[in-house]
Amino acid sequence: MRRRNRAKMLRLVPGSGPLLGRLLLLLTCSWVWAWTGAEARDSDSSLVTCGSLVKLLNTRHNVRLHSHDVKYGSGSGQQSVTGVDAADDANSYWQIRGQPGRPCARGVPIKCGQQIRITHMKTGRNLHSHRFSSPLSNHQEVSAFGERGEGDDLDVWAVQCDGVSWERDESVTFKHVGTDVFLSITGEQYGHPIRGQREVHGSSAQSAHSHWRTMEGVFIQPSTEPLRHDEL
């Protein structure tokens, strides 16, 4: 795969303008390939890697995983997680990271079955679940929890996919390690103040509602030189 100028690559990421400052910090000492779904695949560039920023699309309902500084009015009262139709919403970027106490090296492909954290870029809270009921469907609540990327053991999800590593154009599921539910959407919609957004919840069974695929993003590739502070 040929290398490209960093600034040029950043311009290829849809909706990246307001996020440029934060992306530059993330990409320090690394080179990246920005992928929009139209790029050709090859053995090095087709995998989701540790440290990458991604938008995750629910393939059944065609909505992206989303969060924002709006708390649930019931259940845990933690930051809500929803699904949105818009492809260009900056609140739909999530960073792929290692589990607490076992960081993954930046740019290393995520293996099928690997346990990870999925951290909301704008608020620094982790995708989380626990035994509260979700507001609309009465499944298990999914929230965003923690501060500056640090929460607890209920922030950990296992990537379930076919093959050896998580491929970008592959449909995968996320199983919550602490409670064995699957990250899902079944179509229930909120009213005010997040009208039209879909409920995201944990389902006890894997189904067509629990499949996700990476869409827009900035994907980190391994550096060719030794790095410091290179684990997430």
Image (cartoon, grey):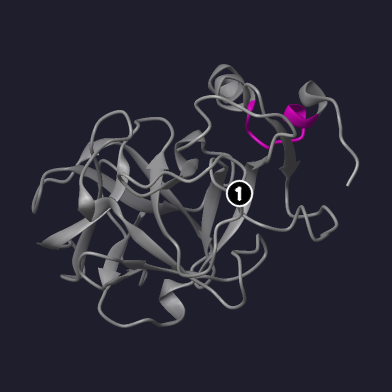
Q: Is 164 rendered above or below residue 226?
A: below
Q: Is residue 21 left or right of residue 12?
A: left
Front-most of residues 214 and 28: 28
Examine the rendering and report whether any part of residue 226 can be seen.
yes
Count the labels in the image: 1
**Residue 214 on the magenta segment:** no
Quarter-wise, where is residue 27 in the image? top right
Would you call the spot at circle 1 few (<14 residues within 10 Å), some (14-19), or many (20 or more)?
some
Residue at horizontal 24%, vertical 37%? 70
Residue at horizontal 22%, vertical 57%? 129
Q: Is 51 rendered above or below residue 40?
A: above
Quarter-wise, where is residue 148 in the image? top left
Q: Position of residue 62 (x, y in %)?
A: 54, 64
- The residue where tag 1 is placed is 108
Q: Is residue 225 left or right of residue 174?
A: right
Q: Is 105 rendered above or below residue 182?
A: above
**Residue 11 on the magenta segment:** yes
* Segment colored magenta: 9-16
Examine the rendering and report whether any part of residue 196 can be seen.
no
Q: Position of residue 107 (x, y in %)?
A: 62, 43
Residue at horizontal 58%, vertical 46%? 87
Q: Position of residue 68 (x, y in %)?
A: 33, 37
